Amino acid sequence: MARRRAIAANGVLMLLACLSACQQQQPSTTAPATPPAPLNASTEPASPLSVSLSVDRYGKGDSTTTRKRERGQGAVRFTDVAREMGVSFRYDTGRSSRRLMVEATGGGAGWVDFDRDGWCDLFFCQGGDPAAADLSTQPTDRLFRSLGGTRFVDVTVPATLIEQQYGQGVAVADYDEDGFDDILVTNVGPESLFRNLGDGTFEERAAAAGVGSRRWSSSAAWGDLDGDGDLDLYLCNYLDYDPRNPLLCLSSTGEPGTCHPEEVPPSLSECYFNQGDGRFTEEAGERGLTGSATKALGVIITDFDGDGRPDVFVANDTTANHFFANRGEGRFEEVAGQVGCATNALGQYQANMGMAFGDYDHSGTPDVYITHFTDDSDTLFRNLGAAGFEDVTRREGLHEPTLPYLGFGAVMADYDCNGEQDIFVANGHIDDWREVNGDPWHMPSLLFSYDGVGRWHDRTADAGPYLKLPRLGRAVASADFDADGDLDLAVVNQDDDVAILRNDSSRGHWLKVRLLGRHSNRSAIGAKVTVKASDRSYVQHLAGGTSYCSAHQPLLAFGLAEHSGPVDLRIVWPDGGIEERSGVAVDGEVVLVESREG
């Protein structure tokens, strides 16, 4: 189809003038010496595969072993730098004696380079009073702009991002293909779709675009589900629940309590297909993307079965998960029961919430980790390709360590670049039951590391002070916000300060890959990249969704352990086109632009 590339001719942003005084701050000593060069959306690549390596961020001849920041020895370690980075935000649940269900679930975050300066900015959706009749009295979502990775500044007002619905989650992508990422906010009520105008400001377009309803939505994911080259939207809807007229639920002692999901009718999820003109149509039913009415909280869009088409994996609370296999031409079939991911290995429905994914076993297919309720361990589904999924939670050491926790956001990544995956999980209960059954309310986050030979190990104790303190954790979103080569995290905590977890791990060699589609969708969601380093290959997918109510930086970060020489890359673009690049240097960033041919 014809691609739309209407890009602003100049790179001058209104916002920069508003913030010029902020730029005079002295940079932190932890910042890279030179910022990454921004992409010029109006410039076409000179060759079929355009590769641009970043500058040496630590000075000529420097290496990861001589960095200015001290590193721990042999462990993943995070430091909360939100305060020193200027990020001041709390997700306000509006928690009250009413014990409204919606007060337990919200708190979304998304990384977005909205001004295309090469640095990740950060967006948070906000809550407030979920039963408020006058939205003008409610707190707004917030956008923080990165000043070269050294500080953030609140630019919500100049960016015209005032949004006062009761927010739940965030999804980021360039849905209109104009070169600037847009922001979707899921709410208890109508969604908000903020179109990036390319001048530092946004306009709200949900109603005009035909997106969203008045349902209680949670996570959302972008992906090219019909293969036409533009992005469609899967919207997880949770329960049929009105916070202004709530169902009264009682605890076992007869006291008012937060309703259990089994006490409230489920809500059908939705899927909006991009018409290519800025408008969407809801077509979940006719496309085979509904299944039974369930309680969706998490979603991943990527090619799980290796047939070259994106599938949709949905985590449903207290009911069977959905796996919508892509049968081609935008048609799907729900086959979770057949492929082994509807329930756990014991055939039990679980309280499925957040979803992490990655190829931890180096099979070339993405595996999935799903967070759950207390006394119901998280679940690790190993992807067997065409044979489906296998629950390996108990066998690989993740059952017992996760039983005491109620998990939400989770991100699987190689945080120490040793060639093996790690999993970060944010935990926190939905209700204060301490005096009822002794369950803790606030809970610490968890960190697990894979040993490469079949077992995961709890490394929480060595991961830094942040993971020692209990909180009500919800969204977790990953990005390399300081452009130093490893992945950092933003964690939303209910009624508490958000955390910006800088990755201070000791680490091996690494490579960052960014993708820019041309024939495929510009965000390149659905692409697969293989890095071949000597006798070992690493595979990553750029997926839609993942975690919980979160949006990650669209970056593939590869840990290469001790491999210091050049590597070879193989890119499978969302439209199926394959390109290769040999002799790429490590310990840097490469930007790959899809060829004209597609």
Image (spheres, rainbow, N blue to C red):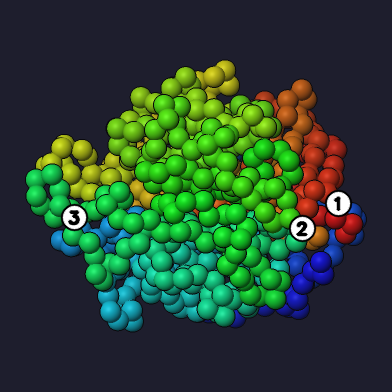
Mark 3 residue element: strand
The residue indicated by pointer 2 is 520
- Residue 150 image offset from top left, x and y in percent: 52, 57
Q: Residue at 24% x, 69% y: name it.
A: 245
Q: On the picture, is 190 further left or further right than 480?
A: left
The answer, for residue 185, to whether it is visible in the render is yes
Residue neighbourhood size for the residue with mark 1, other residues' Cα within 10 Å, grouped as few (<14), some (14–19), many (≥20): some
The residue indicated by pointer 3 is 249
Mark linked to residue 49: 1
Rounded to the nearest angstrom, the CA distance separating label 2 from label 1 is: 14 Å
Rounded to the nearest angstrom, the CA distance separating label 1 from label 3 is: 59 Å
The residue type indicated by label 3 comes to Cys
Q: Kindly indicate the quadrant of the structure image that contains residue 117.
A: bottom right
Instruction: Using the image as rendered, state which of residue 192 and residue 209 is in the foreground.
Output: 209
Residue neighbourhood size for the residue with mark 3, other residues' Cα within 10 Å, grouped as few (<14), some (14–19), many (≥20): some
Q: Residue at 77% x, 72% y: name it.
A: 5
> Which of disc 3 and disc 2 is earlier in sequence?
3
The residue type indicated by label 2 comes to Ser
Q: Quadrant of the N terminus?
A: bottom right
Q: Quadrant of the C terminus?
A: bottom right
The residue type indicated by label 1 comes to Leu
> Which of disc 1 and disc 2 is earlier in sequence?
1
**Front disc: 1 or 3:** 3
**Front disc: 2 or 3:** 3
Mark 1 residue element: loop
Q: Is residue 361 above or below residue 574?
A: above
Q: Residue at 75% x, 61% y: name it.
A: 228
Q: On the picture, is 407 further left or further right than 14?
A: left
